[in-house]
Image (cartoon, rainbow, N blue to C red):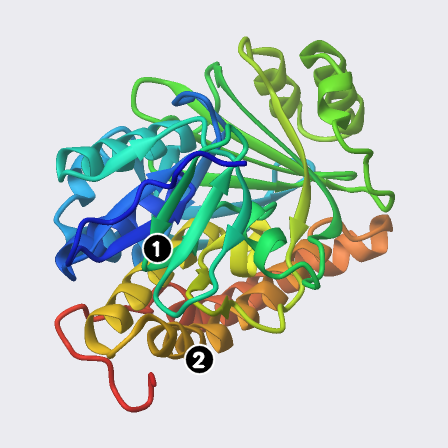
């Protein structure tokens, strides 16, 4: 039996948030502005500020941080990306687009957001792996943790990622994450890559994989690699391969591509991240009773549009607005889902389609891609406004359309 739950003080509106990654701390900061007492419960036993690889946060995500007044503080460890440059496997430039994102290590972003929340007075508890959710009466919900403890609140938000324990507990009928037939890798190197720290993120359409990198001020190279694999890897697969073995596999995969790829891989001294790429099929619902899902727990997206983190941040501000302006959590949860679902599910579909176009088979397919890419990049510029240009105005009340 769990220990006696930590209960709210009389008159206190406590929000239990499962997950202290990117979305959870931002939601907590907004909920403070709404009169809630948010508490973050993280499954990891301690912070891991070097976890993961890196991401490019779009201007729609940055705008959420600007609303909180923390954008410069949180993103100071990153660097701006101002242009995407696309090359074929020989290194020939076949197109470019302006880009205005921030390239930042995921672990440092997590750390900065957590510290902002803690400075604002948000309590963070580690070693709290959620195993069950209970709630029989409206406005009362209990999170039960693996260590035998529990926490009561007036609402619970699952911000615990694509493998959300909250989703498993509250929506056992929900579909599992779907393998997108892609494998991703990432790491950091120091080498004299062409271009230097000029703000360009360079993307290479290789013969059997897609490789991208940016040189940041100071000379560190942030790189990633994606390739197609039809068979889903077994659980725990990444831990069965050493960094050296994985590096050798990537070197063989890109042996026919521009030598720069091998140079960057060879100069990567630290760990090489590797992971299957998943997204989340559309869920029947994001909320049930006094529990709702947010970010990847509700609508995980493959990385091919660079929108996973930004969409979670958009979720946070919309959910907080609904809780601020509507009479009770259940009404707010319904309005939040109605507002967010069309946008995020459209982008999930677009990201999967984009991933499938990265490595066409055969020389004819590659030649057609190289010829048509400038045209598609121009179309992409028109579509980018709907992705990056999205903004949530915190100062305005929730509108009738959002309800």
In the displayed structure image, the side of residue 351 where residue 252 appears, left or right: right
Describe the element under mark 1 as helix, strand or loop: helix
Q: Residue at x 12, y 49 (%)?
A: 69
Is 99 in front, or is 36? Answer: 36
Rendering coords of residue 47 (x, y %): 39, 23
Is 62 in front, or is 293? Answer: 293
Q: Residue at x 76, y 55 (%)?
A: 367
Is 369 in front, or is 135? Answer: 135
Rendering coords of residue 259 (x, y %): 66, 22
Residue position for label 2: 338
Comes first in the chain, label 1 or label 2: 1
Q: Distance between the Cα atoms at labels 1 and 2?
A: 17 Å
Which quadrant would the N terminus be assigned to in this image?
Answer: top right
Whether pointer 1 and pointer 2 mark residues with C-beta atoms closer than 8 Å, the reply is no
The quarter of the displayed image where residue 203 is located: top right
Q: Residue at x 34, y 85 (%)?
A: 403
Disc 2 crowd rating (10 Å Cα; few below 14, some 14-19, many 20+) is some
Residue position for label 1: 313
Q: Nearer the viewer, mark 1 or mark 2?
A: 2
Q: Is residue 301 at least partly visible in the picture?
A: no
In the displayed structure image, the side of residue 275 where residue 213 appears, left or right: left
Q: Residue at x 34, y 66 (%)?
A: 139
């Amino acid at each position: 039996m769990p220990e006696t739950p930590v209960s709210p003080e009389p008159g206190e509106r406590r929000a239990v948030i499962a997950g202290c990654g990117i979305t959870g701390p931002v939601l907590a900061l907004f909920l403070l502005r709404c009169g809630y007492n948010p508490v973050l419960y993280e499954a990891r036993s301690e912070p891991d500020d070097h976890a993961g690889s890196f991401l490019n946060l779009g201007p729609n995500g940055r705008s959420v941080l600007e609303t909180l007044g923390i954008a410069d503080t949180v993103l100071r460890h990153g660097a701006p990306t101002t242009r995407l440059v696309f090359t074929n496997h020989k290194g020939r430039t076949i197109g470019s687009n302006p880009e205005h994102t921030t390239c930042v290590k995921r672990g440092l972003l997590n750390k900065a957001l957590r510290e902002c929340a803690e400075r604002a007075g948000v309590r963070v508890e580690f070693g709290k792996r959620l195993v069950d959710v209970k709630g029989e009466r409206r406005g009362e919900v209990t999170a039960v943790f693996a260590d035998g403890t529990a926490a009561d609140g007036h609402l619970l938000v699952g911000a615990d990622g694509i493998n959300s324990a909250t989703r498993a507990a509250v929506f056992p009928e929900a579909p599992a994450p779907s393998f997108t037939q892609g494998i991703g890798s990432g790491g950091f190197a120091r080498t004299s890559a062409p271009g230097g720290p000029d703000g360009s993120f360079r993307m290479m359409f290789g013969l059997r994989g897609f490789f991208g990198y940016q040189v940041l001020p100071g000379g560190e190279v942030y790189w990633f690699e994606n390739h197609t694999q039809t068979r889903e890897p077994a659980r725990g697969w990444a831990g069965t391969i050493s960094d050296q073995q994985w590096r050798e596999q990537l070197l063989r995969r890109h042996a026919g591509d521009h030598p720069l790829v091998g140079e960057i891989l060879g100069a990567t001294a630290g760990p090489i991240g590797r992971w299957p790429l998943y997204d989340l099929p559309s869920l029947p619902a994001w909320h049930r009773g006094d529990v709702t899902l947010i970010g990847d727990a509700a609508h995980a997206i493959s990385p091919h549009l660079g929108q996973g983190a930004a969409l979670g941040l958009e979720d946070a501000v919309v959910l907080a607005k609904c809780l601020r302006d509507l009479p009770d959590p259940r009404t707010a949860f319904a309005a939040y889902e109605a507002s967010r679902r069309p946008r995020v599910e459209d982008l999930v579909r677009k990201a999967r389609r984009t991933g499938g176009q990265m490595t066409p088979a055969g020389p004819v397919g590659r030649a057609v891609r190289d010829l048509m890419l400038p045209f598609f990049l121009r179309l992409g510029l028109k579509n980018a406004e709907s992705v990056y240009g999205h903004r949530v105005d915190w100062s305005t009340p929730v509108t009738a359309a959002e309800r």
